[in-house]
Amino acid sequence: MKYQRIKAVAKKEFLHVIRDPRSLMMGLAIPMLLLFLFGYALTLDVDRVPLMVWDQSNTPASRDFVSRFAGSRYFSLQETTDNYREIERAIDRRDTLIALIIPADFARRIETGHRAEVQAILDGSDSNTATIALGYADAVTRGYSQEVVLEHARRTGTDATIGQLDVRPRIWFNSDMISRNYIFPGLIAVIMMVITALLTSLTVAREWETGTMEQLISTPLTGPELITGKLVPYFTIGIIDLILSVLVGEFFFDIPLRGSLWLLFGMSLVFLVGALSLGMLISIVTKNQRMASQLAIVSTMLPAFLLSGFIFPIENMPLPIQGITHIITARYFVTILRGIYLKEVGIDVLAPEAGFLAVFGGVVITLAIRKFRKKIV
């Protein structure tokens, strides 16, 4: 390969990108839009759960119990009621997600040391949120129950047997359990995968549709020189997107970057080679911009969102689907980004993922070069 030829092709592609506002919009503006949109809108945190209470007891003990929920950051007391019909209507309108019904004999049973049962009605149409909210409610109830047992033991002078196991959790890497810290690094991987592959999927196909491929074929350019030259501009755009993503995460969303910035960029460059080469291979095979863009979306966006572990845990997927995820490059890049961002891991830990990305990039770019033929079919 000759440097001057590659430089000429790269310059031509740079000029096309600069003169085409749609390409610039797709390459720079859309990734930033997606980062802000998902960064602000997409969250897996469940807090301020709307709560409704029917206090049939209406005693200091029952009001103290309700105050534990109202004072928790996980619940937001919306209103009180005195019948099931209003509870049903509020859940139907999604004004409340959980309703507590405190029985009339609540205080008496608490004071006498007997077991008091409180009914919790949840909206199961969103099963994940309902399960998490029920866990929160159970934690609040257990805390209140332990205090009641201790108080009863103090008054009666008896031993309080609350349990022999005392679990004191300590959370590493994301101690505040903020889902944004977990989502944002994976979001960078998904956006870079989709945008870079989509951009390069149109390059060669565009040359065939506009009729300029015949001119390129008549030049001394070789296939590797043409492909390398066309990849350079989009490789640059990918690096710019990565820099902007890191800056947005640092200054807008306060995402902690605990690992090496150099390792982050190094792994990203390896990933970019594979993602860009995949788009180039699609463009060479299809020779049609519409088909190329559709195939690029199907082969990058859907797997990146659904099968990379970005949102849905791979461990919870059926075994055949788990097997398929092993060929999804976004899966490995998501693992790399989360490891660098949150765990400060090094190349010794990330070597298997980095190796897969390097092999994938080499295989795909080799296939793209072999599939490209300097002849009109």
Image (cartoon, rainbow, N blue to C red):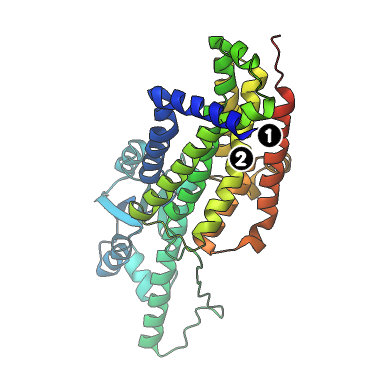
Distance, label 1 to label 2, CA atoms, is 8 Å
Question: Can you say which quadrant of the picture contains the N terminus?
Answer: top right
Given residues 84 and 37, the one toward you in this image is 37
Check disc 2 and give the amino acid type: Val
Residue 133 appears in the rendering: no
Given residues 229 and 360, the one toward you in this image is 229
Residue 241, numbered circle: none
Instruction: Name above or below for residue 34 compared with residue 164.
Output: above
Check disc 1 and give the amino acid type: Ile
Q: Earlier in the sequence, mark 1 or mark 2?
A: 2
Residue 374 appears in the rendering: yes
Residue drawn at x 60%, y 23% as measured from the top left: 295
Residue drawn at x 35%, y 86% as measured from the top left: 155
Residue closest to the far bottom: 157
Q: Mark 1 near mark 2, Cβ–Cβ under 8 Å?
A: yes
Secondary structure found at label 1: helix
Residue, disc 1: 365
Give the left or right position of residue 178, taking residue 271 as reference: left
Residue 273, numbered circle: 2
